Amino acid sequence: MKARQKRLVFVGLAIVGVGVAASLALSALQSNIAYFFSPSEVMANEHPTDAVFRVGGLVVDGSLRRETDGLAVRFDVTDNAATVPVVYHKALPDLFGEGQGVVAKGRMGSDGVFVADEVLAKHDESYVPPEVADSLKTAHVQGVIDATQRDSLPGVLTNPTVAEERVE
Amino acid sequence: MIPELGHFALILALCLALVQASFPLIGSLNGTRSWMTMARPLAYGQLVFIGIAFLCLVEAFLTSDFSVRYVAENSNSLLPDIYKVSAVWGAHEGSLLLWALFMAAWGAAVAAFSKGLPLAVVARVIAVQGMIAIGFLLFMLLTSNPFERLFPVPPEGRDLNPLLQDPGLAIHPPMLYMGYVGFSVAFAFAIAALIGGKLDSAWARWSRPWTTVAWIFLTIGIALGSWWAYYELGWGGWWFWDPVENASLMPWLVGTALIHSLAVTEKRAAFKSWTVLLAISAFSLSLLGTFLVRSGVLTSVHAFATDPTRGAFILVFLCVVIGGSLALYAWRAPAVSEGGHFHLLSRETALLANNLLFAAFTILVLFGTLAPLIYEALNLGKISVGFPYFNKMFLALAPFLALVMGIGAATRWKRDEPLRLLKLLWLAMAVSIAVLVIGLTTDIIGGGAWVAIGLALATWLLASHLVVLRDRLKHKGLGGLSADLRGHGRSFYGMWVAHIGVVLFIVGVTMVQSFQQEVDIRMSPGDVHEIAGYRFEFLGAEPKDGPNYRAQRGHFRVYDGDKQIAELYPEKRSYLGGGMPMTEAAIDAGLLRDIYVSLGEPVGGGDWALRLYYKPYVRWIWLAAILMAIGGGLAVSDPRYRTANRRQTAPVPSGQAATAGARA
């Protein structure tokens, strides 16, 4: 009986320990995750107003503007359907460029400008963050559907792979 | 012609692997000696053919044979020769080949250095390694052939990713892979023992040095990666909790637990099935790491452009390896008797706590790393997990680990007396509590509560280990030290040195996280900015060209008070092959602090966006890894592994081997 009681105590302790660890981990996780939103979703106001989140897409060509003093830099991020203006107050990562994929993490400011405190850098030129690739695809498909419904011309569908090609 | 030769060598290696995985194993099960003796030559053959394939690829790189797709994509005729060689493992296909080469090298090493082992064990271990080799060779030949030709042949290659054109990165992947693949030996020993149904101390002693060597490589590999990220990425951080970093950390954590658990299994014949489980986990996590890096399922700064079929292949392979070995474990492990009873106050208990803490931390890191995948699979949205999560988990567990470590090193096997321990450790306790109290109540150290806790834990570890060392040498004197180092005491000093490495690590992490200063700033030539008492004078940037890049080179003078202490030249490079920009940070390194400057980008009118950092004690983190590796080396070199092997040249029943182990 003694060995069995011992085992029960151990099992009980283990369950309590695992439970405590799991709840601590989950709560820590909950307060440190950042959801991803595409520019279309942000423009549709689906993003949280009081939490950090990520927005990603392509940097719009010609949208990069720098303030004359200080580090602040502004650019627009698009999924080819909607565009979100972003401001960032640190030095940009090496591979940042117009027309390139980017993921910014931060909060939405009250003026509708996304204030990034982190801009994702990558190691490889041909790499596109998977979230960005997805949102570009979704936006593209949505765009094709909209266009077809709007003017129901078969001609619109002649080149449906353009967006995909940029993604892959 | 030569690339085809390499391709052909790979196919031959696959054929050999098929034989290697089947014949010796079957032979060991039905006692056919001639089939078992095939194991060693097959392992050597595997190394020869994969070696040939590897050399063929090196040759293609050195001669800039751009008709090979992989060479054209990752090399350039302007690339310095040294980086042409390191470019071989600069991308996916070549790094797989390197992985396979190391796999074969470990297999051949097992074949060569296992003279004292029973033939059946050697046959099974090599057969299991053959099975893993089949997986990797198939993967390479079916989805990522490094010898694929390209037509039309481009006149010039695309160049190696400039981030990888660095001595640190030239050796970081090989080290890491040696570690990852090294755990395959521990894995193979565990599986072989499960197949044979005999898990005993002898098994633990055989796999112990192999595991430790793999762990040393992994330790160095991770430290090199961290050091490289620190100076090459230009962000000045030493750890980012990036999925790919986590992928290398998890096998290390489990490997560390495994080393400690193997100690118990060898000395006390306890924790057997747990040790097997750890050996399986360490290698499975290594495979998972490869999957995470290569499949591109996670957003990571390290992620490379990927091909989904590869991810699918690795995922299937992963399921076969993990599922198969766990099924075998579930079938065989219950038959293993758990020997070696121990009391609550014993070294076994301390090592058990070590194992539980390491296992818990691994699970938490794994959870945080995979959470984005879980959330997406459950349709809860696309998330990323911020590094505060990992930091919190680390801070929640690390203090306990440090506490137990001090106690464990001082405790005896099987049973210890509370009074003896108290007598031994009271001074260490008093000193560390004093540090804690001083840190919390006064301003002498500065910083927050974590500084006090960190330094108190470091003091506790250092003091308790000094006490343990003194206790060991009390009756022997310094002559005893040298006798120990020549004889069977080396594993003790290995433990001791590695644990002192942990002391350095705690101090380094505590200081750099609490007292570092970072600033992103815009400066014009002539501007001066002060952080942490150092004045940085920016003298402007001018063009400077390298062999395969153009650069802008900044010029800084750093003053401490009125004294100039350093001139720094950070660079912003643009590589000619891909036109990819790259930051070369300039660092004035020191034992107690680094001063770090990196160029962001030109922001007009000669002004630059700059990053200025002050990083106290950051070097201690890498010094810690070096000490841990030295400790591991000392432990492996303990003569008892070799004498034990010699003693068993004649087949010895495992019971006797176990007593031999207990004596040693």
Image: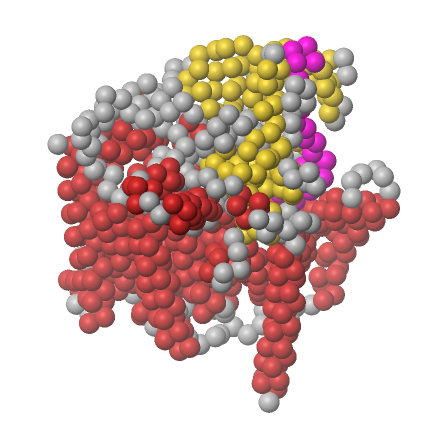
Residue bounds of the magenta highlight: B505-527
**Which residue occupies the foreground of this view, B215 or A135?**
A135
Could one spot residue B436 in this view of the protein?
A: yes
Residue B43 vertical placement versus B530 (above, below): below
Q: Quadrant of residue B567?
A: top right
Q: Position of residue B163 (x, y in %)?
A: 44, 29
User: Is B517 part of what is drawn in magenta?
Assistant: yes
Residue at the location (41% across, 17% down)? B549
**Which residue occupies the foreground of this view, B475 or B223?**
B223
Q: Is residue B23 left or right of residue B641?
A: left
Q: Is residue B546 left or right of residue B513?
A: left
Q: Is residue A153 left or right of residue B506?
A: left
**Which residue occupies the foreground of this view, B507 or B651?**
B507
Q: Is residue B235 left or right of residue B427?
A: left
Considering every residue shown, the one lying at the far bottom of the view is A1
Residue at the location (21% across, 54% down)? B17
Work out which quarter of the rendered image holds the N terminus of chain B and state it. top left
